[in-house]
Amino acid sequence: MKWGKKDMQSKTSLFKKELLIQNFRSVGWVGLAFLIGLILSVPMEIAVLFSGRENYNEENIYESLFSIAQELQLFMLIVIPVLMSIFLFRFLHVKQSSDFLHSLPINRKMLFWHHWLTGVVFLIVPVMITSLILAVFIQVFDLSSYFRDLNLVRWFCTYLAYTLLLFSIGTFSAMLTGISTIQAILTLIILLFPFGVYQLIVYNLQYILFGFPSGYYLNNNLWIEFFSPLTRLISLEFQPFSWWEIAVYLLLAALFCCISLLLYTRRPVEYVSQAVIYWKLKPVFKYGATFCTMLLGGMYFGIIDYRGSLLWICTGYVVGALIGYFIAEMILQQTWRIKPKLKGLFIYFIAVILVFILTGSGAGGYEKKVPRVAEIQSVFFSNFWYFDDKMTNRFIYKEPKIIEAIQKLHTEIVAENRSKDVSEPEPLFIVYYLKNGSKSIRQYEVDRKSFERYLKEIYESKEYKKATYEVLDVNDQDVEQIVFHSNYPNYYVEKVDIANNSDQLAKALKALKNDITNLTYEDMTDERKDWGEIEIILKNNKQLFIPWKKSFKEFDEWMKNNGTVKNARVTADDVQYVLITENNINHDLDYKNMLKEIEQDPQTVKIVDKQLIEQCLQDETESTSGKNIMFIVYKNGNYEVGSFAHPEIAESIKKQAKK
Amino acid sequence: MIEVKKVYKSFQNATVLSNIDLQIEKGSIFGLLGSNGAGKTTLLKLIAGLYKQDRGDILIDKKPVFENEDIKQRFIFLTDIPYFFPHYTIKQMANFYENIYPSFSRERFQTLQDVFDLDLKQKIYRLSKGVQRQVAFWLAFSAMPELLILDEPFDGLDPVMRKKMKNIIIQDVAAREMTVIVSSHNLQEVEDISDHIGILHKGELLIKRNLDDLKSNIHKVQIAFQGSVPSEMLQQLQIVYQEQRGSVHLFIVKGNADEFSSYIKSFKPLLFDLLPLTLEEIFIYEMGEKGYAIENILI
């Protein structure tokens, strides 16, 4: 019983022309749209810009070819390859076409290559045509002088690598799912995955690892936007793809292509229109989604309540995990009304708790590790992370004494471990540069009160003050003028005065420097509202801003002698009267109604005496949580609500006013 | 020859086919019967190499079908809803088939145009459901397959067209020894062309029979005796069913007709008629024997 006739097989060739024609018919429009988009966005735009050369403006130099119609170019870079993959592999997601094509005498490998290569051709050819046009334009218009970096080959290769990678990732997603919409979503998730997971993990590690510098890794990692092809586009204009990057993108494209092929040959075609085709991947998808949303939940809860307790963060984790789990189940079961398998969720939570405990305890070494003083070369210590190296360098200390003080503080923080209730939180950022060349980075938020002893030593040190107050290094003759503002932070009364004669400047500067040098830790953490801001304008146009502290005695003295006080800061003369009352008023009221309420309160004491008003102003804080509230009525009609830094001063003022 | 050996198939956790054993000889027409959801389409798709069985073997000419281009070149699988590429005309679709199937015959295609009488430049998606099915037949016949797998093929065809299609199938089977597998939920629809029948019920193949054997092996007998029926005779006959109307007895008897008629005649009945059974009746009794009511299996 022989069925086959050998001579017939010679008619079949490796490439099925008609299948290619069909593919061309189905996605040709995407390629055509790409070509039209490219021509409109680059050569056309250049022709318009450079045909009227006389309008050309010297400053109008373009960074690279990506600077021309940038939005459209970036849009196409992302959308076209993904669209291409969706339409090409649509046949896998529609039952009839899937059945038809898989019943044909073409094996899956060939089917895959027919489709994949069609996509590649339609992605490359439009870019090639546009490049040829651009090559002609560059000659005709002599464009090279109008671009900082005019590299057509690199432009072409960037398009090639980028679109091929996105197309391959789109293809890979098509293989994983049986629904085109899910393919699009999955593509987006895969594209953002490394970036997002890095962010999520780094952000969440701070909850698990005491001292983990999430902020440092999130803000100071210059590589972070390279983690996703999508975020990579942000700086594409200024930072074109390096040849290395192009190679890596092409390699990754090849990798995704191979995995897609491998998956396709194992694809069960009967699961058309299922969210996840390979049942073995279902748990990966389900618990992967649960894990990511759990981290997202923790991060979100952490952001909405910055000082949230561990319980709060854990609530965030549980809520996030539940949402992720149920959404994943809904997608997998393709219904709103899911029957959750609680057993799986239960096991998941146990596993997560174990991982958290293990990370937390296994990293005990990490949490407890404080380098020995002898190992430390220098140390960065500040209340902020800085983006630019210049600022960062200011806060790097090399003097043994302050290094020792910082190390001592750090040792204490570690010994106390997680500070319980942080009432006066002090953010601390520490980077040790060790003698062996390595870095040790930590970030804490500590209770100022508990570590006062150590903080005092650091804050009062000469080095710390030098780093914090740039003005200490300024010479008299470099100063152009000093401006005294009352409007920040006191915007109720706006006053500005200027000192610009050299005698005034020298005296003011000297007073300021002395005051700063004499600042104690208590002065520096003074709750009292600053008088204003001192702006020192240097001859090189640089500005320095110094908070005008109430503890600046010598400076205040100079101001009084100079007659600047009344011109620059709020004084009793600006105030009509002050009302002092017990802090039991409704703070949600607007000032007018609040004033009415306070006036009606029999406990309220009205201060009109200038000297007493001055005393009030001296002790004013911005916080409204004190025992006594001061309601200031300015002569200019403004109202202000504050309280007293020292309750005893409030009592004494009240007593004196009643006399 | 098509061999299906101990095949199992399940979708996720639902078993669709279990322990299917089937042999289809070259040149035969196999009618696969079963109600909706019995697993007919799945079995056909397994034979066509679309799906892969969980267990067992599916061989055509001793070779596995799945991903086997050589074997797939030799058959055409016509799905229950015919598929054509969007916006394709009949001509374009024919070009596609010609490119894909080495056995495609352009002459056959042109000859068949008289039967179908359709404009080649018509876009297929604009045609009615029935006409689209005609186009699918046209293309399938033109590809001159050695095996034609048809899933509910006559749905939506008018009786005249149905007859024409069946004639072409029979001609091809006679002329080229084409093998045909045709599924249906309707016995009458395949009765006239099939030589073998298989009944699928809830994923199991209940019956597979040669129709000629089946017809010659079961008969309806009407007898009347003076007095009661001799019990000795009843014991000797293989009676599947009996019924009495007055003095006339009706028996459904299995076995060789010649043998048992002469045996019955030896008891000198007053009345003896040997009547043929319709295929449907045969199945009713066959299935009844196995404990199934056919009304539940075929409609």
Image (tube, rainbow, N blue to C red):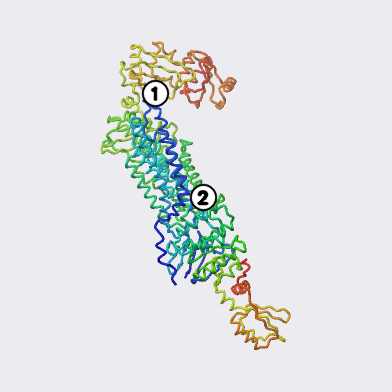
Q: Residue furthest right?
A: B246
How far across and down, in percent of the image, does residue A152 sit? 35, 38
Residue nearest the viewer, comparing A527 with A305: A305
Q: B191 or B205: which is nearer to us?
A: B191
Q: Secondary structure at mark 2?
A: helix
Residue drawn at (54%, 24%) of the image: A582
Q: Is residue A510 above or below residue B14?
A: above
Amino acid tagged 1: Asp
Indicate the position of residue A298 as horizontal and vertical percent values. Answer: 46, 41
Residue bearing mark 1: A523
A334 horizontally vs A71: left or right: right
Q: Quadrant of residue A45?
A: top left
Locate residue A222 relative to residue B100 in the image: left or right.
left
Disc 1: host chain: A
Residue A454 can be seen in this image: no
Q: Amino acid at mark 2?
A: Ile
The subunit letter for the residue under badge 2 reads A
Q: Is residue A509 above or below residue A359?
A: above
- Vertical order, B12 against A589 (above or below): below
Disc 2 crowd, CA 10 A, few/some/many (<14, 14-19, 20+): some
Specify which label sits upstream in the sequence, 2 or 1: 2
The residue closer to the viewer here, B105 or A449, is B105
User: Which quadrant would the C terminus of chain B be assigned to in this image?
Assistant: bottom right
In the rendered image, which residue does mark 2 sit on?
A: A331
- The picture quadrant where one finds residue B259 is bottom right
Question: What's the distance in space between the residues labelled 2 and 1, CA to CA?
Answer: 59 Å
Left or right of residue B298: residue A455: left
Q: How many numbered markers are drawn?
A: 2
